[in-house]
């Protein structure tokens, strides 16, 4: 159902994506779902997903181009580069992805609560500090960092195209993130059980 401003609401966007009407939205949902459910198991997917998500967001927000495919193409290239980087330089790639994912998520939260418009320097500082914590977290607690950061990134990326009331957005974001964390934690528990 279209709103008065011409935007689609969430159920219609999902149905349109399923019916093949909006391939970009379907790709975004697929990447988000993969991050939510497989971010730890396929660490290269997490790094690729973070590259894709952050590049798509930045390109969409900061590049004014009549070509709709350009932000998506840049995001795909960044994702592929991230995957290759992760495969060949695992620890460094995970540390950088941990920083990027945590900083990006902190900045999105700052945008969501209005901090980035009121005090952009404070929002950037918070994002950088949280990014450093994300990098440290990803180095010291590898599996749990991948689970937490891929679930947060995946939940944001899943909800980003949908126009929700801000309070509902936050609630759904946390529910989806907790679901991703639960799924991946269960997989981690099963994987560790198989090793013993």
Image (cartoon, grey):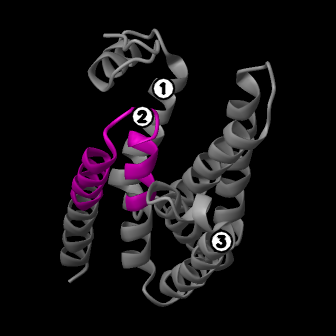
**Residue 106 appears in view:** yes
Neighbor class of circle 3 (other Cα within 10 Å; few <14, some 14-19, many 20+) is: some
Magenta stretch: give its range. Answer: 152-179
The residue singled out by tag 1 in the image is 25
Against 124, residue 170 (above or below) is: above
Neighbor class of circle 2 (other Cα within 10 Å; few <14, some 14-19, many 20+) is: many
How far is mark 3 from mark 1, CA to CA? 28 Å
- Where residue 13 appears, as percent x and y from the top left, is 37, 20
Mark before the other along the chain sequence, 2 or 3: 2
Residue drawn 49% across and 34% down? 28
Residue 172 lies within the magenta run? yes
Residue 152 position by quadrant = bottom left
Q: Nearer the viewer, residue 125 or 156?
A: 125
Helix, strand or loop under label 1: helix
Mark 2 in CB contact with mark 1 (< 8 angstroms): yes
Helix, strand or loop under label 2: helix
Q: Nearer the viewer, residue 46 or 72?
A: 72
Going by the picture, which residue comes out furthest to the front? 118
The residue singled out by tag 3 in the image is 124
Q: Horizontally, is 166 left or right of 5 in the view?
A: left
């Amino acid at each position: 159902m279209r709103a008065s401003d011409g935007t689609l609401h969430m159920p219609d966007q999902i149905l349109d994506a399923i019916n093949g009407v909006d391939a970009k939205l379907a790709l975004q949902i697929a990447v988000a779902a993969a991050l939510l459910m497989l971010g730890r198991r396929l660490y290269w997917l997490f790094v690729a997903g973070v590259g894709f998500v952050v590049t798509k967001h930045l390109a969409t927000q900061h590049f004014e181009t009549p070509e709709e495919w350009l932000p998506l193409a840049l995001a795909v290239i960044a994702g592929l580069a991230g995957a290759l980087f992760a495969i060949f330089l695992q620890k460094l790639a995970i540390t950088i992805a941990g920083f990027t994912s945590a900083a990006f998520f902190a900045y999105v939260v700052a945008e969501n609560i209005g901090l980035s418009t009121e005090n952009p320097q404070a929002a950037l500082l918070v994002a950088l500090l949280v990014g450093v914590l994300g990098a440290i977290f990803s180095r010291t607690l590898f599996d749990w960092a991948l689970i937490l950061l891929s679930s947060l990134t995946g939940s944001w990326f899943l909800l980003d195209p949908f126009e929700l009331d801000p309070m509902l957005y936050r609630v759904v974001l946390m529910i989806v993130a907790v679901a991703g964390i639960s799924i991946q934690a269960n997989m981690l528990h099963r994987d560790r059980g198989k090793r013993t």
